[in-house]
Amino acid sequence: MADTVLTHEQAEAPYRGLRMTADEFLEIPDDGYNYELIDGVVAMSPSPSPIHQAVTTEIVVQIGSYLRDHPLGRVFTELDAHVGQGPTGGDLVYKPELLFVRAERLPEMREKIIGGPDLVVEVVSRGSRRMDSETKKNDYERFGVREYWLLDPQREAMTFWRLKDGKFVEVPATGETFASEAVAGFKLDLQRVRETFKPW
């Protein structure tokens, strides 16, 4: 990403900077690096911090618990999603912290996630704020993601967008819960998420 200072580890990643299709990208063996495909070019994503993982885990637990009693679909963590193509026609494969797909769409996605998930959650990491809040937001909007939640532990901020007539509209997070439309009937406990932002 343009605003990320690469560590030695990132600079040594063997696939970083290579141009390939989504099919080729999804065949890359797991070498321990965190890759995404940005407009047909392999890019590195920052490694998650403990607080980043704590935020992600809290949201996964909340949604996962709800889905056990309300089998509306499935929630996945850090799974590649081939959302579409970038501005120059190259493929886009993002790996959000969390994505949710409705039950009726699951049969066509048994092998891989293709198209915009119903819900995407990104947690801002070191150097990823601009990518998450601008580039990915625009792409998720373009490819029909119904809700996009952006959690920023460093700024102790939560931003929620909902797709209305093809455009993301920010939905203010007021009170103690956020009612999702993408996961019908689910209410995110905002206080429990905020607690993960605090120093341990």
Image (cartoon, rainbow, N blue to C red):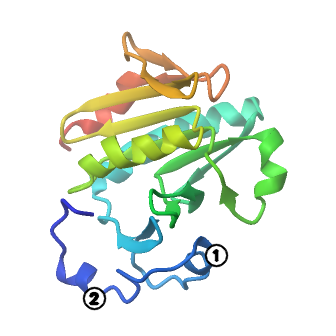
Number of marks drawn: 2
Badge 2 vs badge 1, beta-carbon distance below 8 Å: no
Circle nearer the viewer, 2 or 1? 1
Q: In the figure, 143 relative to 48: above or below?
A: above
Query: Residue at position x 58%, y 58% from top?
Result: 81
Label at residue 23: 1
Residue 23 drawn at (x, y percent): 64, 75
**In the orientation shown, which residue stands out farthest toward the left?**
5
Q: In the figure, 15 relative to 6: above or below?
A: below
Amino acid type indicated by mark 2: Glu
Residue 172 drawn at (x, y percent): 37, 15
Q: How far apart are marks 2 and 1 (CA)?
A: 23 Å
Residue density around tag 2, few if under 14, some if 14–19, many if 20 or more, within 10 Å: few
Query: Residue at position x 56%, y 62% from top?
Result: 80
Q: Does 23 sit left or right of 58 as displayed?
A: right
Q: Is label 2 in a helix, a strand or a loop?
A: loop
Q: In the figure, 99 relative to 16: above or below?
A: above
Q: Does 199 sit left or right of 26 as displayed?
A: left
Label at residue 97: none
Towards the viewer: 25 or 76:
25
Mark yes or no: residue 93 visible. Answer: yes
Q: In which quarter of the image is the N terminus?
A: bottom left
Residue density around tag 1, few if under 14, some if 14–19, many if 20 or more, within 10 Å: few
Q: Does 8 sit left or right of 158 as displayed?
A: left
Query: Residue at position x 48%, y 35% from top?
Result: 148
Q: Is label 1 in a helix, a strand or a loop?
A: helix
Residue 72 drawn at (x, y percent): 76, 33
Q: Return the disc, 2 or 1, that comes first in the chain's sequence.
A: 2
Residue at image mark 2 = 12
Q: Quadrant of the C terminus?
A: top left
Amino acid type indicated by mark 1: Asp
Quarter of the view holding residue 160? top left
